[in-house]
Amino acid sequence: MNETSIIRIPSGIWGLDEMIEGGFPFPSVILVAGSAGTGKTTFAQKYLFEGARHGEQGLFITTLSEPTQWMLRYSARFGFVKREYFGREIIYVDMGSMLRNASGEEILSFIDDKIAEVMPQRIVIDPVTIMKTMLKEEDYRMFLFDLTNHLKNWEATTLLTGEVKPGELYPSDVSYAVDGVILLMLREEDGARRKYIEVLKMRGTNHQTGMQPINIDSENGIMVLKSRF
Amino acid sequence: MQAIIREIGDVGAGERVLFKVSYNRIVQINLVILKILLDEWMKQGIFITVDRPHNYMDHLLKMHRVENRHRLTYIDAIGNYSGAESGSSETNAVNHTPFQIEKLPDDLIKGIRNGSGMVDMRTNDFILIDNLAAMLNYNPLESVVTFVDRYLKAIALYDSIFTALFIDSRNHPGLYDAIKPLCDVELEITTDMSVRKGGVGTDSDSMVKMSGDKKKIIRSILMFSPGGQLEKKAGKPDIS
């Protein structure tokens, strides 16, 4: 083993680890981007439950996408969701209400405090792109820089989910600040919408390129299917 | 935390402790040890940061209500390259670089001998490095081993200094194998935060002494009273 080789943690997503040399770099900050309905939250949940299964502490921070109770209500139908992990191995924090009137500094301080309190090895912020609507353009860029820097300083691998606007491939203002970018996409084929995953960027990783089809089922969540290309 | 307090309470002054910690628990263990040393035992010491800027470590200590942060001096080998804001006026920090790390002991030795270097070791009770393996990002393995060897020899000039190193042995077996013989005591922190002595099991009744050198413990800076209560002493180490 190369002593400087990057430590990797399993993503929990079937078939993804083979595409990224065994898992996400630890520590790192990864953006999971996609439009509505592509499976970003399911991806993030599976990632945390995989960690919990290995005795790792998880922290799930929801922003203004939807209240935590609704997210959990729908997530609970997945077979991988073990309710005994709620509030223990996986701590859910709803920062929707505090976000309404907070500055970038206050948001950062809130997240910092939660991390210091929970001491997680796996963190999710779902979605991070909502902050753009709360902050001024220049403040948002600085906020992202400070946020990713703080997250990298903590010993955790963080998933930031990001909403993609119509016509946009990924939120470019976030992608420059993170170590990895994973795209979840919907494409229309033969009159049906099919789901795909693509690893666009993964620093320090010889990752597989190109879109791979995925399936979402109620037992395993997201699964990468064998390439059809 | 109590298990860790118990185990390091048994460590003799001047003994070099190697903590085997999983890669994802090193900061957590750093914080626990610092809390014990600063707040429980009221000690004064040095923390060398290689893995993350000292500002962030200070921030975490503040978050975890470590009151005696002022007793800690940082040697920050990464802050200048981390994008972090410069050190707050609240912290006592000396900046270094993560490169050519083997030169660091020279500065420490100067401090040890005449107090004119980076820090005066005579005023400190302990010295810790956050994560040895992080040095491998900037230095070849041989240099890191050389550094640790010279560093430990420099610290050994003081019998009463508590020294601890932290490493994830599973991911860095080469560094671990090279460092292990340089230390006196090995404590493995498991994922449930229990402590294994020498990594051989929880029921071992004594710590594994790896160097084979019988050390004369002049004064224990980390000790329990006969009744099992923590002895909180703020005294400085005796220098002879």
Image: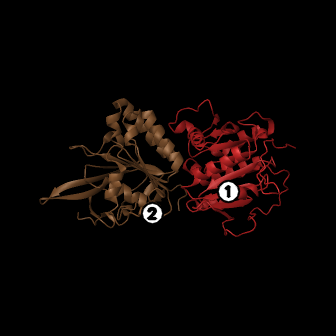
Three-letter amino acid code of the residue under disc 1: Gln
Please state the chain letter of the residue tagged with numbered disc 1 in the rendered image: B
Classify mark 2: residues with Cα within 10 Å, few (<14), some (14-19) or many (20+).
few
- Residue B213 percent coordinates (x, y): 81, 61
Depth check: A120 or B56 in front? A120
How far apart are the alpha carbons under marks 2 and 1?
26 Å
Three-letter amino acid code of the residue under disc 2: Glu
Chain A colour as displayed: brown
Please state the chain letter of the residue tagged with numbered disc 2 in the rendered image: A
**Closer to the camera: disc 2 or disc 1?**
2
Relative vertical location of residue A206 with respect to residue A142 in this rendering, above or below: below
**Left/right of residue B59 with respect to residue A149 in the rendered view:** right
* Corner quadrant of residue A173: top left
For the residues bearing labels 2 and 1, Cβ distance under 8 angstroms = no
Residue receiving disc 1:
B2
**Colour scheme employed for the rendering of this structure:** by chain
- Residue A213 percent coordinates (x, y): 25, 61
Classify mark 1: residues with Cα within 10 Å, few (<14), some (14-19) or many (20+).
few
Quarter of the image where the C terminus of chain A is located: bottom left
Tell me the element at label 1.
Answer: helix
**Left/right of residue B64 with respect to residue A34 in the rendered view:** right
Chain B colour as displayed: red
Tell me the element at label 2.
Answer: helix
Residues behind callouts 2 and 1 on a single chain: no
Q: Residue at x 36, y 36 (%)?
A: A100
Q: Residue at x 66, y 57 (%)?
A: B19
Q: Residue at x 31, y 58 (%)?
A: A74
- Residue A108 percent coordinates (x, y): 45, 38
Residue receiving disc 2:
A84
**Left/right of residue A92 with respect to residue A183 in the rendered view:** right
